[in-house]
Amino acid sequence: MAAALRAVTRWSPLALFPGVLLTGLVLPILVGVLGALLPALGYLPALGQTTWGVHVMAELLAHPSVFPALGLTLLTGLGSTLLSLGLALGLVGASWRTPWLRKLSTGLTALLALPHAALAFGLAFLLAPGGWIARMLGTVLAWETPPDWITIGDPWGISLLLGLTLKETPYLILMTLAVLPQVQASSSFRVATALGHSPQSAWWRAVVPQLLPRLHLPLGAVLAYSISNVDMALILGPGTPPPLAMLLLRFLDAPDLSQRLVAAACGLLLLVLTLAAAVFLLALEGLLLRGFRKWMTPGPSASPGWSFPGASLLGNGLVVASGLSVLTLAVHSVARRWSWPHVWPTQWSLRYWERHLHGVLELAGETLLLGVAATLLALLLSLGTLEFLAASGRSELSHPGLVALYLPLLIPQPVFLLGIQTLAVRWHLDGTWGLVLWSHLLFVVPYLFLSLSDAWRQLEPRYLVIARCLGLNRWQVFWRVKLPMLVQPILIAGALGFSVSVALYLPTLFAGAGRVSTLTTEAVSRASGADPRLIGVYALVQALLPLLILTGALGGSRGWLRHRRGLAA
Amino acid sequence: MPNLMLLRRGKRLALGLITSLLLLLTASPVPAAWPDVVQAARGQTVYFNAWGGSEEINAYLEWVAEQVDARYGVTLEHVKLANTTDAVSRILAEKAAGRTTGGSVDLIWINGENFATMKENGLLHGPFVEQLPNFALVDVTGKPTTVLDFHVPVDGLEAPWGMAQFNFVYDSTRLTTPPTSMAELLRWAQAHPGRLSYPHVSDFLGSTFLLQALLELTPDPSVLSAPVQSDEQLAQLTAPLWAYLDQLHPALWRNGQDFPANNALQRQMLDNGELDISLSFNPADTSAAIASGALPETARTFVLRQGTIGNTHFVAIPFNSSATEAAQVVANFLMSPEAQAHKQDPRVWGDGTVLDLKQLTPEDRARFDALPRGVATLSPEELGTVRPNPHPDWKNRIDAEWLQRYGQ
């Protein structure tokens, strides 16, 4: 951030954008973390707690579930991060020079737009012992009762790990594709194959080691999310003990209010755990790159890696599993009775849709408004900042600036949201639409900025120089040359930003104070009744809204490009 | 029973006297201020924070919103919570920030521990309950839990809303003779491994299952109505419970290594055939679930011979609500015979009334008499003895000990 601020001192009106971006997003988070830190150290005057010390930490560590929860969280968090990284690198490596990748990436973008909760519900309906897959098998094998499978909510967190992987792999694939041009993958690859390496060997030995350092921040975001998420853990994770973030919520939800101090301490532990896991991953990367140097420079070899058919199967598998999950939601939403072992509902009914359509549409409208406002604001801030960077002759934010931008994704949500809630209440901002919008910006801006900055970097600078030479000023160049050239990435980044806003649960809950609700908060509160038909209705609409916006964005950019063939290349 | 004797004298006189008696009954506790409260309530908006996981309850609250709007000009917004403590935390955060007016919650659905902590931390407005006209109709003697919430005196800080009683739910095609005691339940579970479970203790029905077992297994349940005296007392009284669970758990779903996260999920597992027994706190909601297609036609309920735990759930007004008048009007309407009868209808929600039916006018009584009972609902006689919840202290200590023993 220091570098970014130094740049601000060289005054230009454009400097306002990074200024607002960084102070508006980073400062409140730091204050929020502080607000969570105080109760962890024993200070919460509202409950008459003013004794400073480590007694709250001690109470937390004495809780019987903490250490098992810690292990479980590390396993699912690190496991899903590593697994999705491996899948992403493997898939991209096997297919980055084939036309199939372009097709796959549309499917992956759709997966990315799918809210976590909707995907998790669908997966649960699919994989549970009484779920769709078991029913299909049960009909064939004449099972009288559902099998004794330990799938959803298994004590080792495997279904949670798989759910997270399903959701995070597409993101990492798209991020990998974005950094490929930066590391000049094609030339490294050509050199390696010219030296006699097989394509797989060239990918893993020559390209991947260059990619990894550039994936640090996206990986950090994936790691922090996997460690601290509650919406997927709630649906797919085990309960005895639960992952740490769920344990935190249990402390927070305990009727005994003094447990809130323990919840704050648990938040602190979550933060430490995330940092420790990140350091571990960095160390692992260092070790691998150093330890495998011998393996990497042995001269030509034909191993290892996946062949294209295997990768295509796996990649399509990801898309199909998610598609089936959404389909189960749809079937449940129109079922009246659907008991074991029937593969299809025995009684159908549109009753839930009839009863809820009005309310759901109203909520969808509010969600849309909030998401569109957050996306437009985030676009404005991101475009302004990118222009500021371009004007000051740099192609990207300084490293500290990037970390600052990523901060909301790197710090576990429950930690700083608690602190921010107290502040918001003090300033009478809680429950206002503006605060909810701001809380969404915290998460929409980083995703949007990062996907846009790639497009900005890849823009051929000579067009801009020519435009300047033709007498256009900076503003005209931006408006008449850059924007038209970048319509496609802007629309797609906007659609993804919108999907981030739609999926936000905890931020909306904390900032909205029950006065502002979205499809997601309503879906989660109704899901507490575990009625699959109702969950089907809400989760389906929750999933369809971002997909609709994405389809619109893709259609729009296709229409835009139809008469501008040169841009499509 | 003077009114019964009067009846014999003559129909006209009796009717006249009954009417005036009833008028007296309903009129006497009304403080002069009530019309002022109703007057002030007009135009206010009440943010009612209540669990939003039940279709039936949400629909009932929509009906209530229409009624209070039409009758009192009060706007009722149901803030649907995934968890009641979401709202309790918010009220606490508001207290922490020193906000004494304009709070985000105007009415909250609570009982038991949540009430105890809110009362203890000064988060509640009132006392207000005694001045609500319909409170006079509440059966405070026949249903003592309407004024003693888990043995914590209500002190006019929360208005009784409905009655609950612990019961078991099963599918009669898979379970033919339901157990009638904890000991029989254990034998059944051992004969049918993997087909029984109970929710994790973080769900209130999970801890209620433990308390229900404790009431039946401990030699002297009467001490459970006071707070825990000492660690020795706790250890001594709960020893039979842990011995029981140690025997039970290996026969449970997933060998008692994991538990359904909540009761709603467990009911879903019963419907799916993953379990044979589920738990409920509302004797009528199994019938309602059959009607909505959430459980099979063959679902039924049972209770234990020695009686099961019953309690009352309430609505309370947070200390910093800015719509206290309208919140009181809503609380009063929720206790009205009309709203209570509509609520008890198993086709609506099926939640038991807090009112003393004997005190109602014949017309109001008729509303209750006309209600169908529902195919899976037990009669009051079959439901048997209602046993009070142990003091919240026991629940906290037992939950903690349970986590220590089985929660890892």
Image (tube, coloured by chain):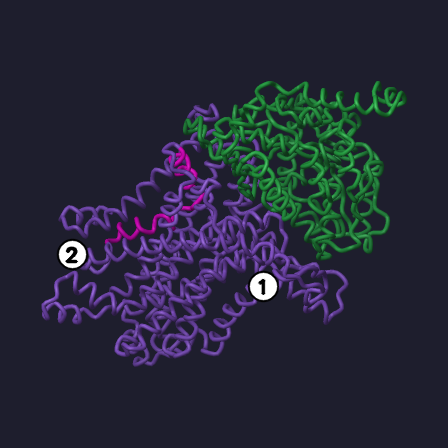
Chain colours: A purple, B green
Which residue in the structure is indicated by mark 2? Answer: A392
A38 displayed left or right of B63: left
Spatial distance from mark 2 to mark 1, Cα to Cα?
51 Å
Q: Quadrant of the N terminus of chain B?
A: top right
Q: Which mark is residue A330?
A: 1
Query: Is B312 rendered above or below residue B176?
Result: above
- Residue A33 spot, x, y in % from top left: 38, 39
Q: Which residues are magenta?
A: A398-425
Q: Which mark is residue A49?
A: none
Q: Amino acid at mark 2?
A: Ser
What residue do we see at 69% from left, 22% from top? Answer: B226
Q: How many marks?
A: 2
| Quarter of image, res B17 | top right
| Quarter of image, res A358 | bottom right
| Disc with the residue nearer the chain's start (2 vs 1) | 1
Q: Secondary structure at mark 2?
A: loop
Subunit ID for the residue under disc 1: A
Which tag is nearer the camera, tag 2 or tag 1? 1
What residue do we see at 49% from left, 62% from top? Answer: A544
- Residue B130 spot, x, y in % from top left: 63, 21
Say whether residue A262 is visible: no
Nearer to me, A66 or A569: A569
Subunit ID for the residue under disc 2: A
Q: Quadrant of the C terminus of chain B?
A: top right
- Residue B135 spot, x, y in % from top left: 67, 25
Is disc 2 in the same subunit as disc 1? yes
